C-alpha cells in the first residue's frame, strides 16, 4: 500500500456540503487500497475573521499569541472532516501540528519546518485509519504553536509527502490546475498540463495564487511532484515537477 497525501484549501472545506465532497476524494483513494494522509486549511474566511477579531482587541498582539489564535481555524476543520468521514463509515483521526509533531524554527508567523516525527501518523495508517492533519502550523523548541505564513497548508502537505515518502501529493483547489492567467477573469487563460518548479515559482512571485513560492521551493528541494486539481470538477489538473 502506497501513501497518498491530499491537501484541501479553505474554499474546498468552507461548509459541511463541501466537506462531504472532500470525503468523496479521500474515500475514492482509500478504497483503492491507499494509505491516506489529508492536510486541510481553515474553512473559508475563518483566518481573515480571526485577524479582524484580534484587531478589535489590540493592534500590538504578541507574535506568540497571534499564532495561537490563527491556528484555531485548522483545528476546527480537522475535527469536522473526521466527523464527516466517521459518519460515512470510515475510521479517521485528526492531529494538530503540535500533536504530530511538526517541528519548526522560532519565527512566529512565518516559521519554517525543520523536522516531522511521523511515528504517530504511521501507527494510525497501520491501523487502516485515515489521518487528517492541520496545515499551516507547527511547534517550536519552546513548545509554542507557530504558523507557517502564506501558503502554509500547502507547505505542510509538501513536507509530509517528503517525510512519508508518499507516492503522490495532490493539492485540491477551486480551479482545475495551473493557468497562464486567472481563468476566472481571463477567457483566454491557458491551462498547463505540466509545469516546472522554476516556472511555478516565477508565476507565484508574479502574483499567481494557486501555489505559494515557499511551498514550491520546498517541493523542488525535496523532489516532491505536486498534482494540482479541482475539488469540484473532473479533470487532469497540472503536474508541477
Image: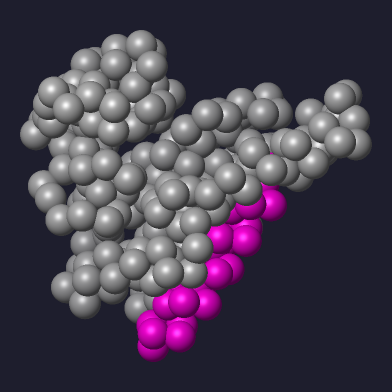
Front position in the image: 211 or 132? 211
Q: Residue at x 54, y 63 (%)?
A: 78
Relative side of 15 to 2, left or right? right
Q: Residue at x 32, y 45 (%)?
A: 174
Q: What is the x, y in percent for residue 121?
A: 46, 63
Q: Examine the rendered structure and indicate whether residue 164 appears above or below residue 64.
A: below
The question of residue 75 being in magenta is answered with: yes
Residue at image x 27%, y 56%?
A: 232
Residue 125 location, quadrant: bottom left
Q: Residue at x 37, y 40 (%)?
A: 158
In magenta, the rendered stretch is 70-98
Query: Can residue 88 be seen from the camera position used here?
Result: yes
Q: Is residue 47 above or below residue 22?
A: above
Q: Inspect the magenta stretch and tell me whether residue 114 lies in it.
A: no
- Quarter containing the N terminus: bottom left
In the image, is 12 to the left or to the right of 140?
A: left
Residue 45 locus on image (x, y percent): 58, 45
Does the rendering let one see residue 197?
Answer: no
> Viewed as shown, does residue 226 lie left or right of 72?
left
| Quadrant location of the C terminus in the rendered image | top left
| Residue 190, horizontal then vertical, whole percent | 12, 26
From the viewer's perspective, tell me whether residue 18 is left or right of residue 99: left
37 and 11: which one is in front?
11
Which color scheme is applied? one colour
Please tell me how many numbered marks the rendered image carries. Answer: 0
**Image coordinates for residue 187, horizontal then vertical, percent:** 17, 27
Q: From this view, report whether residue 184 is shown above or below residue 166.
A: above
**Residue 209, located in which quarter of the rendered image?**
top left
Amino acid at each position: 500500500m502506497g501513501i497518498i497525501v491530499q491537501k484541501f484549501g479553505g474554499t474546498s472545506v468552507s461548509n459541511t456540503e463541501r466537506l462531504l465532497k472532500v470525503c468523496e476524494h479521500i474515500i475514492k483513494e482509500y478504497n483503492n487500497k491507499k494509505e491516506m494522509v489529508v492536510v486541510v486549511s481553515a474553512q473559508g474566511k475563518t483566518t481573515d475573521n480571526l485577524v479582524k477579531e484580534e484587531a478589535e482587541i489590540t493592534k500590538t498582539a504578541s507574535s506568540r499569541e497571534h499564532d495561537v489564535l490563527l491556528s484555531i481555524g485548522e483545528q476546527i476543520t480537522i475535527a469536522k472532516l473526521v466527523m464527516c468521514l466517521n459518519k460515512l463509515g470510515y475510521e479517521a483521526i485528526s492531529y494538530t501540528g503540535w500533536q504530530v509533531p511538526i517541528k519548526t524554527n522560532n519565527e512566529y508567523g512565518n516559521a519554517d519546518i525543520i523536522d516531522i516525527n511521523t511515528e504517530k501518523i504511521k501507527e494510525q495508517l497501520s491501523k487502516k485509519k485515515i489521518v487528517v492533519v492541520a496545515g499551516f502550523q507547527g511547534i517550536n523548541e519552546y513548545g509554542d504553536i507557530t504558523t507557517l505564513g502564506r501558503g502554509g497548508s500547502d507547505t505542510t502537505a509538501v513536507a509530509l509527502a517528503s517525510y512519508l515518502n508518499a507516492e503522490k501529493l495532490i493539492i485540491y483547489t477551486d480551479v482545475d490546475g495551473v493557468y497562464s492567467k486567472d481563468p476566472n477573469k481571463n477567457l483566454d487563460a491557458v491551462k498547463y498540463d505540466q509545469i516546472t518548479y522554476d516556472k511555478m515559482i516565477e508565476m507565484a512571485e508574479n502574483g499567481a495564487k494557486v501555489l505559494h513560492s515557499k511551498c514550491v521551493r520546498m517541493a523542488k528541494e525535496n523532489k516532491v511532484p505536486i498534482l494540482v486539481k479541482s475539488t469540484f470538477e473532473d479533470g487532469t489538473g497540472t503536474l508541477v515537477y
